[in-house]
Amino acid sequence: MEENKQNQVARIQDFDPPKNPKTNKYAIACSFLASLSSILLGYDIGVMSGAIIYIKKDLHITDVQVEILVGILNVYSLFGSAAAGRTSDWIGRRYTMVVAAGIFFAGALLMGFATTYAFLMFGRFVAGVGVGYALMVAPVYTAEVSPASSRGFLTSFPEVFINFGILMGYVSNVAFSKLPTHLSWRFMLGIGAVPSVFLAVSVLAMPESPRWLVMQGRLGDARRVLNKTSDSLQEAQLRLADIKQAAGIPENCNDDIVEVPKRANGDNVWKELIFSPTPAIRHILITGVGIHFFQQASGIDAVVLYSPKIFEKAGIKSDHDKLLCTVAVGVVKTLFILVATFMLDRSGRRPLLLTSVGGMVASLVLLATGLTIIDHSEQKLVWGIALCITMVLAYVALFSIGMGPITWVYSSEIFPLRLRATGCSIGVAVNRVTSGVVSMTFLSLEKAITIGAAFFLYASFAAVAWVFFYTLMPETQGKTLEEMETLFGTFWNWRARARELKELKKTEKNSNDNGQIQMGTNNPAMQNLMT
């Protein structure tokens, strides 16, 4: 009898994960280093908002040329994000980050030494390719190395560093604004080469993604990484089992080096993802692409890139004062993204996202109202200036606490392993195209329909986004990456599927009393949910 009690205790200890797992410092360090690549995009966005003031004066370019110069990096980044999926599958997630850093380094130097508009555009092209690489690979790597208990926290790191990069760009604008016009913008852009050096060096301290290692047949290496990045040894074993199944490796195969079954070629991946998707994959693709589209269509890049223009329209005339106001925008964005990182795994994705987008709608409407009133007033309205500044700060704060980080968290965790790199590349491509359209049309839109009407338009997109998210997007908090596919496929009826999955987990937990483990997609009942 005593022996049976001891065996029962052993089963509970072995199979029930701890209620409050300790913070995995190794996983945090890996995610931190990987997410440094996101500084590249953030810095470029932030610094260009101020540098363009001096570029326009020095090179004597038109507003249309300004729009193209500011927004074209997003289009150029498509080349990087399109190539990053295949590159990361070929040489690994880690060395793809080195490629991103090297390309951006060259682009930053070219922009810093540019002597003509055409030369500057070429530098933007090179930097844009590097940004595209970084945008795709950092969230994928972080999602693949993170334990389920803290995946939201860790996969929000790229957005944290985008915001930190924006703040660095704003500070750089203020720091170099007192230099002669022909030098100020060149220093602002050229100094962006420095973060890419730190990124390239940091890669040496990072392990490769365990999922990529399994796809290469390196089970021993993958097992060691999973043991370090999981909350418990049991979780590491379960994660490895799920990845092996997704890669087509037999469950009982435990050699350090194995031969991986030939995977579907790129054409079959595109066929499964785009041309002949299952209902679950179609649902995943719609939500993954939709969240990227709405993140940018709600006008965040118009606010961040053209904040000096917004403050000028609100009544602030001094270039230095406008740049100081942009620093306040960067500080608020960075502070609130840090708050979001600690709430993602406690509050869930949906509550934060819906609260964030609802608040963005309200702040955009009030900003548009304030700008419209000021535009039609012949007197300086102090309360109007205060309202506009407050609403800009509120908008970026609300964006950073939900829409900003959750876009990258959500899209990087919902795609199944076999489609993850390609699916995330598509999401990044949509993100950058939408961002490019917004940033390259803002000045023309402001002239055509007024700046207030432009922000009313962005508010309408944000309102549609709220409905989209509420209707179609399941909660993914606490789910393993290999369980995601079971949540999708019924579109607006996803709540019923979530309840079935919850009941199934209760059944699995009860089965542990008999010393049985049925988790992830290895469970026949789970297989039924997926079909």
Image (cartoon, rainbow, N blue to C red):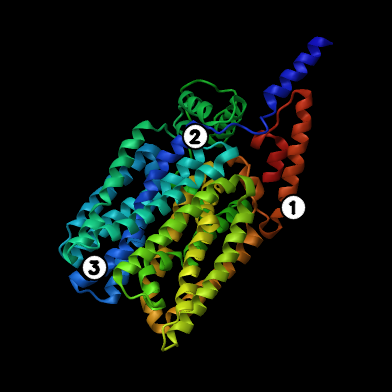
| Classed neighbour count for the residue bearing mark 2: other residues with Cα under 10 Å, few (<14), some (14–19), many (≥20) | many
| Classed neighbour count for the residue bearing mark 1: other residues with Cα under 10 Å, few (<14), some (14–19), many (≥20) | few
Q: Position of residue 84 (x, y in %)?
A: 38, 47
Q: Position of residue 57 (x, y in %)?
A: 21, 72
* Residue annotated with mark 1: 496
Q: Is residue 357 left or right of residue 57?
A: right
Q: Is residue 381 left or right of residue 343?
A: left
Front-lying residue, 47 or 444: 47
Residue at image location 67% in from the left, 45% down from the top: 530
The kind of residue tagged 3 is Tyr
Q: Position of residue 481 (x, y in %)?
A: 58, 41
Q: Is residue 242 visible?
A: yes
* CB within 8 Å, label 3 to label 2: no
Residue at image location 46% in from the left, 79% down from the top: 371
Q: Which mark is residue 27?
A: 2
* Residue annotated with mark 3: 54
Gap in Å between the C-alphas at discs 3 and 2? 42 Å
Gap in Å between the C-alphas at discs 2 and 1? 33 Å
**Above or below — where is 431 with respect to 367?**
above
